[in-house]
Amino acid sequence: MSDLLTRYEDVRQRISTAVNQNCDLKPPKLLAVSKKHAVDKIKQLAEAGQRDFGESYAQEAVEKIIQLQDWSLIWHFIGPIQSNKTKLIAENFQWVHSVDRLKVLKLLNKHRPGNQGAINVLLQLKVGNETSKSGASYEDIISLAHSAEQFDNICFRGLMCIPPPSEDFHTQCAYFQSAKTVFDELVKRFSSVDTLSMGMSNDLEAAIAQGTNLVRIGTDIFGRRDH
Ligand SMILES: *Cc1c(COP(=O)(O)O)cnc(C)c1O
């Protein structure tokens, strides 16, 4: 087996171990974050059965999506969104995880081609007292969610979060727990909500312990990214 497939199997094993340690959990969906990695590696994983891939840079992603269009993969945009990239994103991705302002929501709705069906949107929640620019507050999330519901070309599916980095399991869990609380509230209020995207290479166990249903794994599957 190639290094890539060995690492992929290791990640799948870590996910099932974490799921088994928490009774009553369904396994989360695994999103393979392929940004800065070559099309060949994506093909290897697709052959091993991986369907969902995450990308952070619109232009780079679209080149790969075009090369891989015969593979019927599911593409998720997870990076910061510039307004001038919303058309490219709306035309090429099935999911967007990183929406945190009304302007972007409006532009995605406007640019989504009618024949492609609604684009699946997660709102990015700011968690922790981070200085990070991305992510919306709880109050903003509620108001964005109401707007999302009004747009015909948007399907509001839930939340994404990227907590401040921490090596401490309990700190990681506290961040994820706060996101899970907001998610549970949204599930009660909005019938289309079913997806909580949290957990990366360094904190997937904590995210699973707190009830994530989609983990986004880059480094531990693909190895280090070249910059
Ligand atoms: C790059 C990235 C990931 C993957 O992170 P790793 O630590 O490499 O697993 C997950 N989510 C987002 C939003 C990213 O930008």
Image (cartoon, rainbow, N blue to C red):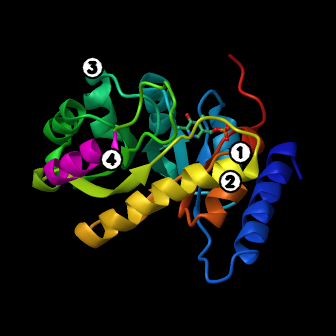
Q: Residues within 10 Å of mark 1 (few under 14, many from 20)?
A: some
Task: Kindly tell me whether residue 31 is visible in this rendering.
Answer: no
Report the amino acid beneath label 3. Answer: Asn
For the record, the magenta segment spans: 137-148
Q: Residue furthest top?
A: 227
The reply to whether the C-beta atoms of the residues labelled 1 and 2 are less than 8 Å apart is yes
Pointer 2 residue: 204
C-alpha gap between disc 3 and disc 1: 30 Å
Q: Which mark is residue 138?
A: 4
The numbered disc on residue 16 is none
Disc on the earlier residue, 4 or 3: 3
CA gap, disc 4 and disc 2 = 23 Å
As helix, strand or loop, the secondary structure at mark 4 comes to: helix
Indicate which label's residue lies in the foreground, 2 or 3.
2
- The Cα–Cα distance between marks 4 and 3, rounded to whole angstroms, is 26 Å
Residue mark closest to the camera, 4 vs 1: 4
